[in-house]
Image: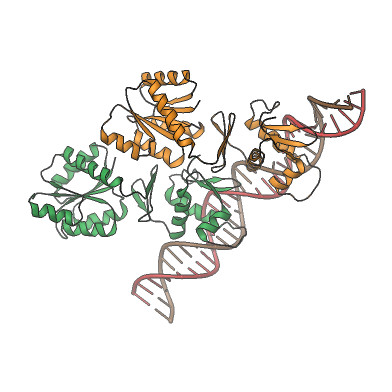
Chain colours: A green, B orange, C red, D brown
Amino acid sequence: MARVLLIEDDPAVRDGLTLALKGRDHEVEAAASGEEGLDRLAEFAADVVVLDLMLPGIDGFEVCRRIRASAATSIVMLSARGDDFDVVGGLEAGADDYVVKPVRPQVLEARIRAVLRRTESVQSPVETYGALRVDRASLTVSRDGRKVALPPMELRLLLHLSATPGRVFNRQQLLESVWEHDYLGDSRLVDACVQRLRAKIEDVPAEPRYVQTVRGFGYRFGPV
Amino acid sequence: MARVLLIEDDPAVRDGLTLALKGRDHEVEAAASGEEGLDRLAEFAADVVVLDLMLPGIDGFEVCRRIRASAATSIVMLSARGDDFDVVGGLEAGADDYVVKPVRPQVLEARIRAVLRRTESVQSPVETYGALRVDRASLTVSRDGRKVALPPMELRLLLHLSATPGRVFNRQQLLESVWEHDYLGDSRLVDACVQRLRAKIEDVPAEPRYVQTVRGFGYRFGPV
DNA sequence: AGAGCTATTACACGTTCATGACATCGTGCG
DNA sequence: CGCACGATGTCATGAACGTGTAATAGCTCT
């Protein structure tokens, strides 16, 4: 259902929630500290971060601020303390919701869903094509939840093709709109870029699912 | 009336709806799982997908997303659950309508018609000639709802002829505009290409319905 | 029946694309 | 400043596929 990054230092709570969330069909990654959590986030395209406040090293508020600074990921805070000060502080640091421990997994999951429901309707420029996700705001691409680093040209090519799935572009059109080349002339440049892109986003580059060849015409994103 | 792909794992519901829709003059294909549905869609050019949410394997939401990623096909979701979350989630996943089970076939059909009516006005450069459908954006051709793979020259020929149905082109004109040959000279090249094209798109190639011979002049697409 | 067209099929050549190696360019870092 | 690295463009190779040609059969109209 959703990709959850759980940052929690207490192994018992961490493992318990991980299991419970996985049991409800979420994809879960766990981290034991703020540093580790931020590292994970660099390659795990989480939909939501569940963030304990009491952490060794940099604390939850700081982690929250750093995530907010760099990503649009939703954040659900988790804390043993439920007084107003913490709640307000947490929400002001940029959290989307605040849950007081101990928490029943069902409740946490409902909160996660609610948060996602709320944010999904707002932040739109994220397109999901099967296992491939293209975020046009942060310019990140992930495949099966793993962020894929794409060099500039490959990214531009993907953005351009995926903007109108199904439509076929010939090499000339791509050279003009993606490369902004104006010279006409035969070039295998587009081919090479397509190959490199496929190597990164396709499961079986020889049988591409996303970037398909239309022999004699060009390339197309999407349908068979 | 319309081509419907029904993805539903419950055999009773599946067969019931299939029969009912066929009885109302729709062409129906049924699939018992999300995977099967997506497979079918690769070769069955459905106008609308009726999609159960509770499926074995990949669930309805995911199927919906994948279809949306690759095709412009309309989607009507079908679910036993009608709470807000499901409805909102379904519509956000890209469904065009959401129907709660149990549903009377008449109602489902009315929904299908409404969805098609809505999307038909939007949809793009897709031309339908009888059982033949030509999509000029994705460069795909389907016949009786089956996608037909056409080699470049045959596709170009078909695109050119079908662009102005009824108009007769002689071989010289076709050589120039489709083949971009500038040399004049007698050639049976066009004939050969026409034959190959007919073999793929005509029901009875000997009595062509789409690509017609005009003896002494050339060829013409479509009606007499 | 015969001339003039068109259909049909087979095959070899040519084109197109995938793939990987290589050259070049630019950038950041020591 | 020079080095290292990643990104980008170019090229050579090989395989797959499509296409043009030609030869033959079939049809249609006079």
Q: Which quadrant, please, contains the N terminus of chain A?
A: top left
**Residue in the picture at 55% in, 58% down:** A176
Q: Is residue B36 visible?
A: no
Q: Residue at x 74, y 32 (%)?
A: B213
- The residue nearer to you, when weighing A37 against B206, is B206
Horizontal side of residue A8 vs A162, given as left or right = left
In the visual, does B126 lie left or right of B52? right
Q: Is residue A42 above or below residue B82?
A: below
Q: Quadrant of residue B10?
A: top left
Where residue A150 appears, as percent x and y from the top left, is 41, 56
Residue B174 percent across, percent down from the top left:
72, 43
Could you say which quadrant of the image residue B208 lies in? top right
Q: Nearer the viewer, residue A132 or C19?
A: A132
Q: Is residue A136 left or right of residue A189?
A: left
Decide if residue B16 is in sight here: yes
| Image position of A105 with respect to C26: above or below | above
**Residue B42 spot, x, y in % from top left:** 49, 34
Left or right position of A218 against B224:
left
Q: Nearer the viewer, residue A160 or C10?
A: A160
**Number of callouts in the render?**
0
- Counting from the top left corner in percent of width and height, residue A35 is at 21, 58
